[in-house]
Image (tube, helix red, strand yellow):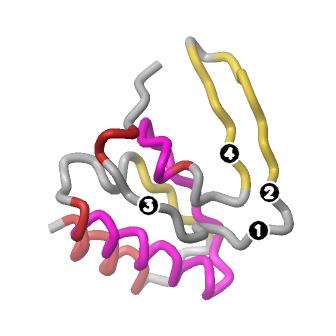
Amino acid sequence: MQRVAIARALMMDPPIVLADEPTGNLDSSTGQSILELLRGAVAAHRTVVVITHDASVARRGQRVITMADGRVLRDEDYDAQPVLREAPLSSSSVQRK
């Protein structure tokens, strides 16, 4: 259902996509499918903002901002890297702050 919801939202051709825990509560295969949909949005020159507790999902981003208690702890910009780059998707790498 999440894939369908994301696909439906992308069909509206929004300039910005906000994805709150897009892979939460999904098996790794379905999570990978969701991330591929978001990668397609980036390829179509949309801005994609992903909010996640999953470090393996966060590592795919061009810019990763780590927050705790409403404060920015780290702001890492990976300009030379493509947005939503390949990284292993693993439920064991979930970090909660």
Residue at image location 37% in from the left, 47% down from the top: 21
Is residue 10 a member of the stretch shown in magenta?
A: no
| Residue bearing the label numbered 4 | 64
At label 1, counting other C-alpha atoms closer than 10 Å, the crowd grade (few under 14, some 14-19, many 20 or more) is few
Secondary element under disc 4, as helix, strand or loop, is: strand
Judging depth in this view, the residue of 93 and 9 nearest the camera is 93
- Please say if 48 is above or below 56: below
| Residue bearing the label numbered 1 | 81
| Mark sitting earlier along the chain (3/1) | 1
Residue 17 location (% of width, % of height): 52, 64
Residue at image location 62% in from the left, 85% down from the top: 43
Of marks 1 and 4, the one in the foreground = 1
Marks 1 and 2 sit apart, C-alpha to C-alpha, by: 5 Å
Looking at the rendered structure, which numbered label has been put on residue 55?
none
| Mark sitting earlier along the chain (3/2) | 2
- Please say if 83 is above or below 56: below
Quick one: which residue is furthest to the top in this view?
69
**Callout 2, which amino acid?**
Tyr
**Callout 3, which amino acid?**
Pro
Give the magenta range: 30-57
Of marks 3 and 1, the one in the foreground = 3
| Residue bearing the label numbered 2 | 78
Marks 4 and 3 sit apart, C-alpha to C-alpha, by: 16 Å
Residue 86's image quarter?
Answer: bottom right
**Callout 1, which amino acid?**
Gln
